[in-house]
Image (cartoon, helix red, strand yellow):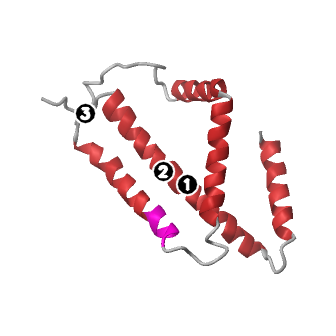
Amino acid sequence: AVSVIMLLDFVVVSIWGLVPNMTGATLFGYLGTIGVFLILVAYLLTNVGAIWFFFLRRRLWSWQWLIPLLAIVFLGYTLYSNIYPIPAPPYNIFPYVALAWLLLGLLCIIASPSLAQRIGLHLEESEGLQAGSTEVVTDAPAIRQPD
């Protein structure tokens, strides 16, 4: 996997290096901007997943649901404010590059759902979670069930 990433990095940097007046700092800024869009989406989806997992699947009820909800609001606003008003070129295409990268990942998941399932099971095991468990947690501190 590391070799594939290194090869991909080499190809991308080599192609960008052919662009006239492209410096290393400019390239870093461009790729970093695209990366930030992807990180913002990852954080947003993580908070959506936190709400789903902890409050719907595990049925943990507390005021703490506000934290991921506020994070979703702030992350959504940050994404929106980086897309609108439309930035000057070439920054105006970066959200679409990030979206294409996300769609490529989604396509990989659709093409090989068993791979995505194996990754999910591995993550659950590495976190000490029981795969497919619907157990309700009631003994956690500061957690109470709704009346």
Q: Position of residue 120 (x, y in %)?
A: 56, 28
| Number of the label disc, if any, that sits on residue 43 | 2
Looking at the rendered structure, the kind of residue marked 2 is Tyr
Magenta run includes residue 27: no
19 and 43: which one is in front?
Answer: 19
Q: Position of residue 123 (x, y in %)?
A: 55, 30
Q: Image height check: is 30 above or below 51? A: below
For the residues labelled 1 and 2, say whether their Cβ atoms are less than 8 Å apart: yes
Q: Which range is magenta?
A: 78-84
Q: Badge 3 local density, few (<14 within 10 Å), some, or many (20+)?
A: few
Q: Tell me the SS state at disc 2.
A: helix
| Number of the label disc, if any, that sits on residue 39 | 1
Which image quarter: residue 142?
top left
Q: Quadrant of the C terminus?
A: top left
Magenta run includes residue 82: yes
Q: How many angstroms separate mark 1 from mark 2 (CA)?
A: 6 Å
128 displayed left or right of 65: right
Looking at the rendered structure, the kind of residue marked 1 is Ile
- Which residue is painted at 84% across and 49% down in the image? 7
Q: Tell me the SS state at disc 3.
A: loop
Q: Image height check: is 56 above or below 14? A: above
Q: How many angstroms separate mark 2 from mark 3 (CA)?
A: 25 Å
Q: Position of residue 16 (x, y in %)?
A: 81, 67
Q: Which residue is mark 3?
A: 141
- Which residue is painted at 19% across and 31% down in the image? 144
